[in-house]
Image: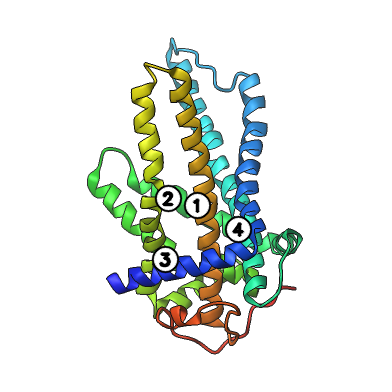
Amino acid sequence: MFEKLENSWKLAKECWRILMLDKEMLAFPALSTVTTILVMAFIGYPLWAAGFFDYAPATNAEEVKAFHLSILIKYAVLTIVPSYIIYLILTFFNAGLVTCAFIRLCGDDPILADGFNIAWKRLPQIFTWSLLGATVGLLLRMVKGNNSTLRSLFSGVLGLGWRVASFFAVPVIVAEEKGAIDALKRSGQLVKKNWGEALTLEVGLSVLAYPVMLPVMAMIGMSSYVWAVSPMLGGSLLIIAGVYTFVASLVFSTLDAIAKAALYMFASGDQMPENFNNEILQTMFKRENATSPSFA
């Protein structure tokens, strides 16, 4: 187990080196976040202005029924609809990021337009995958429920299983133009014989994130102490912690996409990733005979 975690660390360092060659790849998760915020604001502000969030106490049976119906409608609007929209946005920009990672790993120098071009061409597949992924996410939330340790544990196991099964879904969509179900099947085939390695990478990058986030916890803790003495200093610490968290999330999202692109090329293609330490990949995945990624 420790050896596999060590491989995750080596893979993360190798992906960091690739990122330093194409720092513009960080723009994809950044634009994904900004786009999500803008879209949610675009949807939420008109609803707020129209009084959608207003609450009026019920005084009779008919008003109680109407109130319950309004709660269901608001739940759908505020939970279900945003889940699908957010998943679509995240998948679209992640597809662009994975495309640029593929191009770099094939020995070329990508630009942002390359990623957006392929992501736009794969929009039908991205859309169907977003429907499937968001639906699974909503079902997992329903299974989790509230105030139940057993249900939370069960939901966590199912969630981890889903993340491992869909490990290569976006790379498959980008490279093979497969729809949601076929992409999930293909991803499952690639991790079936190597589920331990896929699980290790999925957990390994999360483990590596903890030490990186220690300064954030320290700044938040310090801000609570200094706030009473100097609100400006306490607020500054919170702002710095927020910016640090945002940047760290961008970096880890990009490293994760690069790692999956490299592993996909190695596990499914007959082309070795270029300018990459493939000895790390050889210790993690077995190769299959298949076609190399194509970006048309």
**Crowd band around label 3 with a 10 angstrom C-alpha radius: few (<14), some (14–19), many (20+):** many
Residue designated by label 1: 135
The alpha-carbon separation of the residues under discs 4 and 1 comes to 18 Å
Q: Amino acid at mark 2?
A: Leu
Q: Is residue 262 visible?
A: yes
In the depicted structure, whether residue 146 falls above or below residue 32: above
Query: Which comes sooner in the sequence, label 4 or label 1?
Result: 4
User: Tag 1, which secondary structure?
Assistant: helix
Badge nearest the viewer, 2 or 4: 4
The alpha-carbon separation of the residues under discs 3 and 4 comes to 17 Å
* Position of residue 183 in the picture relative to residue 158 (left or right): right
Query: Which comes sooner in the sequence, label 3 or label 2?
Result: 2
Q: Amino acid at mark 4?
A: Asn
Task: Identify which residue, 77 or 17, lies in the foreground.
Answer: 17
Query: Which comes sooner in the sequence, label 2 or label 4?
Result: 4
Q: Is residue 1 visible?
A: no
CB within 8 Å, label 1 to label 2: yes
